[in-house]
Amino acid sequence: MSLKGEEIMHRSIIIFLCLIFLFISGCKPEKKVTQEKGQVVVSLGEHKITVEDLRVALKNLSPQEREGIRVNKALMDKFVEDMAYMEAMYLEAKKENLENDPDFKARLEQQKKLLLAQELIRKKLLPKLKVEDKEVKEYYDKNREHYKMAKRYKVSHLMVKDKKDLQLAQERLKKGEPFEKVVRELSIDKESAQSGGSLGYLEEGRMPPEFEKVLKKMKVGQISEPVKTQFGWHLLKLEEIKEAGYVDYETMKESIRNVLLEEKRQKLIEEYTQELKKKYKIEINKTLVDELFLKGQI
């Protein structure tokens, strides 16, 4: 996981922990030494955060966030540290009697409604969601053209600014130095240079025309003659060719299943909200809503 990815995940975890401790810490009895159960992960005087608390907090994260923490010890340590700080803030807020603040109570009630609505969907509707393999295959066959792929070239490149550096690179390659080594030391494309100049797969019709013209004439393993673009001079190495075709069913199966599950989920929720509309005789005063909106009173 990149540093940027870790920062984004860390911010989302902080936000989530704020909610976790509003609703879990706020609703559970305060833990005294005589009441604690399970192994203690964090101690705040007489107050404890147990392994059970940690598991509850992790369980309520998204699968992606849980997996990130599971495989990254630094993220796990930060998560536990954030739990400790949130617990300390919770205790401090109680001392300040903030839980009895009218505005806080109103926000808490709104969040409670949201969480209960989500829990209703999770327990009442989601168990009904199921997509059979037959449905997935039918969707794939019906939409097969969407999975068509053009011819692709797996390419690595070395990029320099002028002919002097280009000549130096060519001389070193002629002497038998590995392409990847020369790239790492001479290429001005520092990002790709870290991986030996790899550009991944370039799709026919969707790459620089200067590259495509040369690659079409090359064989796998070859290094091209110099190619000039607006960015400088390039030497291309053709690693692999994948002919045009279709992404196979097995590769797309789970992705399609998720699409169908989401479609069914949306349909179930829509049908259920219509049931609730009749059951609770929901009526919206659109005239008043429009008036409030136009007057900027919302």
Image (tube, helix red, strand yellow):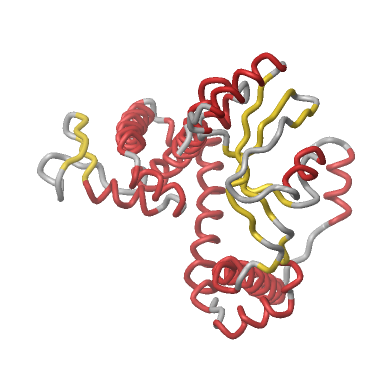
Residue 162 x %, y %: 72, 16
Q: Is residue 120 above or below residue 287?
A: below
209 versus 56 height, above or below = above
The percent coordinates of residue 297 (x first, y second) are 80, 37
- Residue lying at the far top of the rendered structure: 164
Residue 74: x %, y % from top left: 33, 33
| Residue drawn at (62%, 81%) of the image | 137
Q: Which residue is found at the position 66% from the left and 37% from the top?
A: 236
Q: Is residue 212 visible?
A: yes
Does residue 282 appear left or right of residue 58 in this picture? Answer: right
Q: Quadrant of residue 95?
A: top left
Quarter of the figure with the C terminus: top right
| Left or right: residue 209 compared with residue 17 | right
Quadrant location of the N terminus? top left
- Would residue 7 be seen by someone viewing this image from the given angle? no
* 262 in relation to 69, above or below: below
In this rendered view, identify the residue nearer to me: 115 or 295: 115
| Residue placed most toward the observer, 289 or 115 | 115
